[in-house]
Amino acid sequence: MRVTLDVFSGRENPFWDLSPEKESELLARLASLKVSPSGRRPPDVLGYRGFIVTALTGDLCEYEEIRVFPKRVIALRGGRTLYFSDPDRTLERWLLASGRDCIEADLLKELSAQVGPE
């Protein structure tokens, strides 16, 4: 699975691929979240908007896309949109930590202050 940090408007966003072990952990963490009957779309703002996780060819993931943003998660699976609540931002913090080596140090510091430590 590929994780994209959705943060820039005028240049390419940082991205990284999860190992099979990390992919399994991501899916376990997603499964532990409370399902919401409905949800709001990601914020339409400049700057940090969360993470976009997409399945790559060969992934065993049943999700086409997972959007993780402050306190909420939207997942697309089999043409359906599923909404999850993440009030403690645990999945968001975990994704930020998973990309530590791919995110510029200043940006990582700024985002860690917003999202909180893993």
Image (cartoon, rainbow, N blue to C red):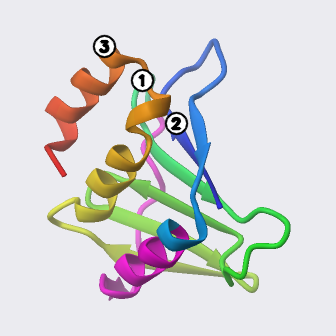
- Residue 33 falls inside the magenta stretch: yes
As measured in the structure, the alpha-carbon distance from the residue carrying label 2 to the one carrying label 1 is: 8 Å
Residue 38 visible in the shown view? no
User: At numbered mark 3, what does the secondary structure look like: helix, strand or loop?
Assistant: helix
Q: Which residue matches tag 1?
A: 47
Residue 111, percent from left and from top: 27, 30
As measured in the structure, the alpha-carbon distance from the residue carrying label 2 to the one carrying label 3 is: 16 Å
Residue farthest toward the right in the current orientation of the protein: 57
In this view, the mark in front (2 or 3): 3
The local crowd at label 1, few if under 14, some if 14 to 19, many if 20 or more residues have their Cα within 10 Å, is few
Residue flagged by tag 3: what amino acid is it? Asp
Dot placed on the residue nearer the N-terminal end, 1 or 3 = 1
Q: Which residue matches tag 3?
A: 106
User: At numbered mark 1, what does the secondary structure look like: helix, strand or loop?
Assistant: loop
* Stretch of the chain drawn in magenta: 23-44
Q: Which residue matches tag 2?
A: 6
As measured in the structure, the alpha-carbon distance from the residue carrying label 1 to the one carrying label 3 is: 14 Å
